[in-house]
Amino acid sequence: MATAPAPAPTPTPDAAAPLPAPRPERPFSVALVAFPGVRAFDVSVITEVWGTDRADRGAPAFDLRRVAADTDTPIPMRGGLTLLPDRPLTWLDTADLVVIPGLDDHLTPAPPPVLDALRRAHARGTTVAALCGGAFTLAQSGLLDGRRAITHWNLVDLLRTHHPRVTVVPDALFIEDDNIWTAAGTAAGIDLCLHLVRRTHGAEAAATIARSMVTAPIRTGTQAQFIEHPTPRTDRDADALAAVREHALRHLHEPLTVNDLAAYAGMSPRSFARHFTAATGTTPLRWLLDQRLAAAQKLLERTDLPMPEVARRAGFGSEVTMRQHFASRLATSPRAYRTAFSTGSVTGGSSPIAR
């Protein structure tokens, strides 16, 4: 007797909206919104991710523009730096993505024309993202009222106090609500930028940019901001956990469990889970799932392997299980992901993932 299909899993904070369709007719356009008070570091991160030509390494083309209310006046930044805008705020009307840097003074009022332009961009359905204290700019615009948002862990209370209508998430790297993305401090801004590249252009494109920046390509938004660093007494455990992660990556195609990883580390499952979470900011099970998803994405992009074989090599065991996790975490299906991001450059016989 046929059984009814299982209901689709509820998307996690990393899932957000379904993946947008590729736009090969023109480069993906990104608007960096600038005004006096924006942080030079965040401006540099945005520029490094979307403003560097990596076509020789197979990265996609981007069109990054510095957008401001006044394009004739350089914008001062801390440290004696200046930023010269090259597009007016009306350019947000055609941007695919709008990114707001953090602020040196988190209570800096944004110019009213900037706030109006952000509201119009979101109303048109444009993805809007803010790094670190950029959440305060979004809150000023009213776009975060009644929505979840994150900022640097040290600014959470300040954001709650000055913008009580915002639902502030206390501990995450980045989060999405209604196509509005916010990120925690400093390095989390890099994580969010790479995640947005991964959503629109695929895991391989994000990995190419991450390699160029010498940074990790995958840190999921639900990972904790603050991670306890090992003390000298626990250095041995930290080394053991690094070896476990390396072992797991080499054996993703096997039916690994948390108990298997704990045994490899020579720890009890309870002790292993505690040390793993303290060292990485995420649980062993979630970390293992993230790696399986990354492996499946790479296989879908770079090979023509059938779906059951992709699922097996990535360690999901079955196509059904893989499909459920894609729906839950990426808000798409493996087949739709392959259609959107397949490069067709590698055949199944030379897959980089363990066979």
Image (tube, helix red, strand yellow):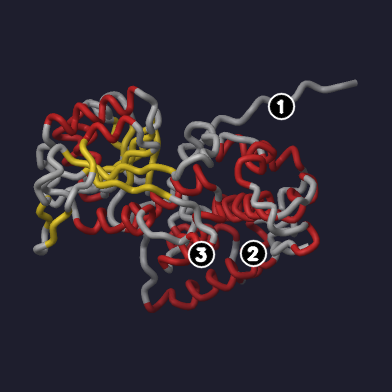
3 or 2: tag closer to the N-terminus: 3
Q: Position of residue 211 (x, y in %)?
A: 48, 66
Q: Quadrant of residue 108?
A: top left
On screen, residue 352 above or below 100: below
Q: CA distance from mark 2 to mark 1?
A: 29 Å
Of the pair 61 and 155, the residue shown nearer to us: 61
Identity of the residue furthest to the right in this view: 1
| Disc 3: which residue | 56
Q: Residue at x 46, y 61 (%)?
A: 54
Residue visible at 50% across and 48% down in the picture: 198
Whichever of callouts 2 and 1 sits on the residue coming sooner in the sequence is 1
What x and y, as percent, mark residue 223?
Answer: 43, 50
Report the quarter where the N terminus lies.
top right
Tell me which amino acid carries mark 3.
Asp
Q: Which residue is mark 1?
A: 6
Is 267 positioned to the left or the right of 255 in the image? left
Is the residue marked by circle 2 packed among few (<14), some (14-19), or many (20+) residues within 10 Å? some
Mark nearer the N terminus (3 vs 1): 1
Question: How many dots with numbers?
Answer: 3
Would you name the residue on which mark 2 appears?
248
Examine the rendering and report whether any part of residue 319 can be seen.
Answer: yes
Q: Quadrant of the C terminus?
A: bottom right
C-alpha span from label 3 to label 2: 32 Å
Query: Is the residue 206 above or below the residue 332 in the image?
Result: below
